Image: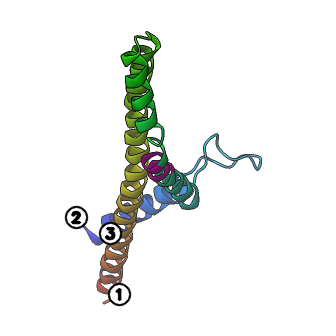
Amino acid sequence: MTWDEWEQLKTAAQDRSARMQLNQASNQGGEQGDLAVDRQDLAAIGDSAFKLFEDLGRYGRDAWSSSQAAAKDLTTQEFELGSGLNVVQKKWEKQLQSLVDACAHISNHMDFTKKAHQGDEYFIASTVSGIETLDKGFDEGGKN
């Protein structure tokens, strides 16, 4: 490859990259794209999910022991309502556990997403700065 061919390829690449838009919709007429999110939004979602996870774990089973005692007492007295209350309590526990698991998943995913994007940004920045250094080396070589 000759030096002139290299310069033509660099110019063509710069023209293409100048037209490229990363991580955003085109801003035509001052309108934003349909979806917009930033790190603060993601952090708020993750924090809310974690707080809900903690609160459900702390308070979601407050009625468990009294419900079990009432179900046992009603069953002992031969009320059918006792077994019904027991079924309701078991369903509540199952739904509560599903909700706690979902909150933990959301919170963990937001943490993972934040860390993954930080790694991506570091990689992109180091790659771009490496290309810039390489270009400078070629520019200096062409001037000699």
The residue where tag 1 is placed is: 143
Of residues 119 and 94, the one nearer the viewer is 94
Q: Distance between the residues labelled 2 and 3?
A: 23 Å
Q: Is residue 82 above or below residue 40?
A: above
Mark 3 or mark 1, which is nearer the start of the sequence? 3
User: Where residue 22 sits: x, y (%)?
Assistant: 50, 54
Crowd rating for badge 2 (residues with CA inside 10 Å; few <14, some 14–19, many 20+): few
Residue flagged by tag 3: what amino acid is it? Thr
Mark 2 or mark 1, which is nearer the start of the sequence? 2
Task: Kindly identify the residue that appears in the image at 42 percent across and 26 percent down.
Answer: 89
Q: Give the range drawn in magenta.
A: 52-58
Q: In this view, does 138 lie above or below 30?
A: below
Task: Kindly identify the residue that appears in the image at 45 percent across and 35 percent down.
Answer: 66
Is residue 53 one of those drawn in magenta?
Answer: yes
Q: Is mark 2 on a helix, strand or loop?
A: loop
Of residues 78 and 10, the one nearer the viewer is 78
Task: Kindly identify the residue that appears in the image at 42 percent across and 47 percent down.
Answer: 57
In which quadrant of the rendered view does residue 75 lie?
top left
The residue where tag 2 is placed is: 1
Describe the colour scheme in one phrase: rainbow
The residue where tag 3 is placed is: 127
On the picture, is 62 further left or further right than 6?
right
Report whether residue 3 is seen.
Answer: yes
Q: Distance between the residues labelled 1 and 3?
A: 25 Å
Q: What element carries label 3?
A: helix
Label 1 or label 3, whichever lies nearer to me, is 3
On the picture, is 35 further left or further right than 109?
right
User: Where residue 93 sits: x, y (%)?
Assistant: 39, 31
Mark 3 or mark 2, which is nearer the start of the sequence? 2
Residue flagged by tag 1: what amino acid is it? Lys
Contact between marks 1 and 2 (CB within 8 A): the answer is: no
Q: Is mark 1 on a helix, strand or loop?
A: helix
